[in-house]
């Protein structure tokens, strides 16, 4: 009895309230620091130069590119310093592991800078797409692959299985992929309604989707839109949103480390910031401009966007500023 080896895993509940996952954590894995806005959990295994970091993250299924296998694979290849591949080249890089209630896509990439290799697991669920990733040298990955795979297979999900990722037929190999962050999600509701003074010439329009709190139009011959959204404070990285806004005015995506130029602005009685973007338009024929103001209220982030032809946005800039000053946000939680 005294010679028996201890069980190699211990039961562990992921540190969230309420937990999104439960899993069995290998006994020699240790919790590590991680970016709470980009990741759900992180662990290290091994000592010194031989240590490897394992990360757990997710995207919401409606995030831009979240369900595109090619975009995610090429994002990881860029992290390793590898060139992008075409959809026809995914076969040798991706395998599938199925068990009752779970289909897992396994991506194994090697040949990166300094001999780096990555092994990643993609597990689509109805509410989130989960990513488990281990990066290191080939020898490190070989040493820890079996335990890493067992860990990923041990995870229990409270939500039903989702659709496996597929490469879009029109996805370009060099198309920028989204960051591994959670896309915008609606914030929890609060009591009351958004209040404001509507500038002359602005009209209320039906909301195009459930993400919007309000939509307005302004301008006659070349109308612009004013879009109000309210998101959870953990809506995701700003670079993802900045690139989406840049695309709306016909600008290319910015670099991951690019600085986002913001100017201070008041939204009601809250301090906020505004981004001013101008570009040639998606058709490169109609110059477009966008003013995006945002502020934080409790656990919510409010966005107010004036988007349209550059001439109209310039004409409506003063009215937009007056609208922002008139805003009274619902609820009484102010940050």
Image (cartoon, rainbow, N blue to C red):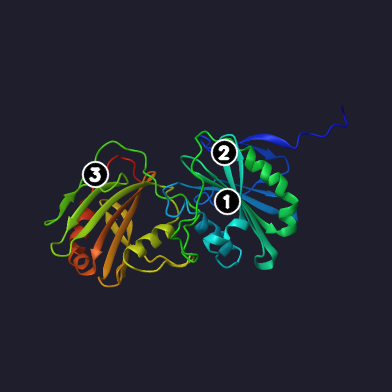
User: What secondary structure is marked by label 2?
Assistant: strand
Q: Which residue is mark 3?
A: 194
Q: Quadrant of residue 261?
A: bottom left
Instruction: Return the disc, 3 or 2, that comes first in the chain's sequence.
Output: 2
Relative placement, left or right, of 31 versus 259 is right
User: What secondary structure is marked by label 1?
Assistant: loop
Q: Is residue 198 visible?
A: no
Vertical placement of residue 10 versus 112, above or below: above
Q: Quadrant of residue 331?
A: top left
- On residue 34, the disc is 1
Q: How many marks?
A: 3
User: What secondary structure is marked by label 3?
Assistant: loop
Relative placement, left or right, of 269 versus 72 is left
Find residue 165 and report its horizontal and vertical position in percent. 51, 49
Q: Which one is in front, 21 or 44?
A: 21
> Mark 1 or mark 2: which is in front?
2
Circles 1 and 2, Cβ within 8 Å, touching? The answer is no
Q: Which residue is mark 2?
A: 102
Task: Count neighbours of disc 2 (C-alpha within 10 A) and say few if under 14, some if 14 to 19, many if 20 or more.
Answer: some
Find residue 156 and report its horizontal and vertical position in percent. 58, 35
Find residue 107 and report its horizontal and vertical position in percent. 61, 53
Find residue 310 and report its horizontal and vertical position in percent. 23, 68
Instruction: Return the disc, 1 or 3, that comes first in the chain's sequence.
Output: 1
Relative placement, left or right, of 149 versus 5 is left
| Residue sitting farthest toward the left | 200
Q: Which corner quadrant holds the N terminus?
A: top right
Circles 1 and 3, Cβ within 8 Å, touching? The answer is no
């Amino acid at each position: 009895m005294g010679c028996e080896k201890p069980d190699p895993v211990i039961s562990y509940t992921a540190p969230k309230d309420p937990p999104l996952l439960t899993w069995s954590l290998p006994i020699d894995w240790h919790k590590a620091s991680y970016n709470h806005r980009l990741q759900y959990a992180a662990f290290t295994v091994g000592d010194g130069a031989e240590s490897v970091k394992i990360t757990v993250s997710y995207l919401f299924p409606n995030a831009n590119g979240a369900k595109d296998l090619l975009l995610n694979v090429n994002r990881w290849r860029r992290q390793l310093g590898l060139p992008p591949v075409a959809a026809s080249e995914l076969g040798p890089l991706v395998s599938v592991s199925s068990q009752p209630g779970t289909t897992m896509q396994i991506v194994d990439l090697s040949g990166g800078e300094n001999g780096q290799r990555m092994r990643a697991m993609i597990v689509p669920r109805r509410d989130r797409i989960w990513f488990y990733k281990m990066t290191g040298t080939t020898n490190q990955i070989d040493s820890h692959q079996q335990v890493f795979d067992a860990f990923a297979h041990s995870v229990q999900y409270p939500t039903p299985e989702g659709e496996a990722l597929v490469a879009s037929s029109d996805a370009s190999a060099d198309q920028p992929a989204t960051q591994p962050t959670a896309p915008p999600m609606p914030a929890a509701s609060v009591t009351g309604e958004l209040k404001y003074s509507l500038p002359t010439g602005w009209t209320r329009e039906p909301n195009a989707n459930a993400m919007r709190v309000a939509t307005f139009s302004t301008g006659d011959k070349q109308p612009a839109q004013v879009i109000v959204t309210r998101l959870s404070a953990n809506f995701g990285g700003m670079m993802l949103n900045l690139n989406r806004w840049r695309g709306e005015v016909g600008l290319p995506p910015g670099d991951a480390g690019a600085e986002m130029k913001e100017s201070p602005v008041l939204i009601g009685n809250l301090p906020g910031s505004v981004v001013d973007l101008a570009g040639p338009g998606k058709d490169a024929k109609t110059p477009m401009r966008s003013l995006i103001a945002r502020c934080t209220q409790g656990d919510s982030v409010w966005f107010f966007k004036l988007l349209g032809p550059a001439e109209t946005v310039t004409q409506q800039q003063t009215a937009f500023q007056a609208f922002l000053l008139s805003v009274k946000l619902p609820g009484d939680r102010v940050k």
